[in-house]
Image (cartoon, coloured by chain):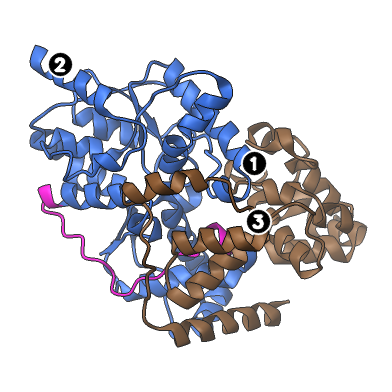
Amino acid sequence: MSQTPQETLAETAGDFAAEVEALSGANLARCLQCAKCTSGCPVAGRNDIRPHELVRLVQLGMADEVLSCQSIWQCVSCQTCITRCPQNVDIAALTDALRRLSRAQGKVARGTTVPTFNDIFLKTIRKRGRMYEMGLMTAYKLRTGDLFSDVGKFPMMLRKGKLPLRGPRIKGKGQRKRMFARAKAVRGDRK
Amino acid sequence: MFYPGCSLEGTARDFHKSTLAVADALDIDLQEIPDWICCGATAAHQSDQTLATVLPAQSLLAAGSKTVAVCCAACFSRLKTANHEITSDQAIRQDIAEVLGQDYDGRTPVKHMLEILARDVGLDEIARRVVRPLAGLKVACYYGCLLARPPEITQFDDAENPTLMDRLLEAAGAEPIDWPHRTECCGGSYSITDVGIVKSLTGEVLSMAALAGADCVAAACPLCQINLDMRQKDIEAETGRKIGLPVFYFTQLLGMAFGLDAKQLALRALVVDPDPVLGKLDKLGVAQ
């Protein structure tokens, strides 16, 4: 009897590919390696691993290579790959899943500040309910030591009313805190 | 109900103001969802799948089942994605109910302002309200990534060649130009974490618009607008080539056609000076 692509992948690539598929919902066995994703990817030119290669490496179970690469932190989440894939392999969701795994396993590529930015962003939402650009920028600069980039733009932005100094405070802080904690717990159950 | 999104309270205050002014001119009621919260944006979907769905769900639930109008393309994408996930997977719906403490069916309709204006109000009605046609104004309509992609989720327009904004501004008398970069990415939120990506992608979009003969760009997303507008001078300095393209929100251009003034449309918040383009418009208006 013929096997489904799903079974074949689990047998050849083992746990890693199966885990990534479960986390992302992307059916990686369908990939034809046609590289249409890479052709349309706006950042493929600067990637250490290009989108179609990322799929192949996961199929082959090469966890360290994909979890510690720069590419997953350079993906701009523009959704071009999934929109154009003739096999409907959700590479955008795959990349998100690899980012989460990379962080969970402490394999984030050196030099990227994206996870730091994301942490500050989410913490701000938990506390305030909404984004607060001035607070986000200040915290990010302090955490990364990138103190001076774009500082020259601040006076202009303040003058144009683009940077309110007072941050928002939406009620329900306690409820949000519980929601963030429960979201983490649900994810743990799923695994 | 209206979901402005966080950017509209800060960097995109001109999008906010011009949207409310245009809605007011058309008698559209844009009442804000009470205590709406951030959609989580890129930070949430890169970090925590459940959180990325539950944050939009909380605001959508607060809207009752009324249609939610959205301005920011990134919010639009997150709200539509949350609805898609909750309606297509019962297990996700249960997870979200557990985290939220309340069941949400994922069926609160979400529409971008472009859809509301071009489809619900309709192009004929828009054209009827125009008192100062944008005649002769060559506009590069820039959709960016998240309005049209992926089409199964956003159900906005053709994913590769959307024309909704072109048709809307055409109804206001403008001349939308044909150009290839309408759905290319600007680099989005990497403006802070990896500005090199943003400068290179934004530079390509801007130079293509200039090459295609645009007088200005029309944007429908706060991230697109701020990257194209605020980074333009840096890109000109690095490449040594003048671009000089004002980057309006489509609501600002529409508002001009409705006869609203610069203050009502917050035109002073734009970084690239719009005056030369507005001057051209005045001259053409007089010539007619």
Is the residue at mark 2 from the same chain as the one at mark 3? no
Q: Which mark is residue A85?
A: 1
Label 1 CA crowd tier, 10 Å (few <14, some 14–19, many 20+) = some
Chain letter for mark 3, please.
A
- The answer to whether residue B191 shows anywhere in this view is yes
**Percent of width and height locating residue B245:** 38, 26
Q: Amino acid at mark 2?
A: Lys
Residue B15, above or below A140: above
Q: Amino acid at mark 1?
A: Cys
Q: Nearer the viewer, mark 3 or mark 1?
A: 3
Q: Amino acid at mark 3?
A: Val
Q: Which residue is mark 3?
A: A114
**Percent of width and height locating residue A41:** 65, 37
Q: Which residue is mark 2?
A: B283
Judged left or right of residue B172, residue B217 is right
Q: CA distance from mark 2 to mark 3?
A: 47 Å
- Residue pictured at 16% horizontal, 60% vertical: B29
**Percent of width and height locating residue B279:** 20, 21
Stretch in magenta: B24-46
Chain letter for mark 2, please.
B
Judged left or right of residue B58, residue B185 is right
Is the residue at mark 3 from the same chain as the one at mark 1? yes
Foreground pick, A104 / A187: A104
| Lower sequence index among marks 3 and 1 | 1
Residue B30 within the segment the image draws in magenta: yes
Q: Colour of chain B?
A: blue
Query: Which chain appears brown?
Result: A
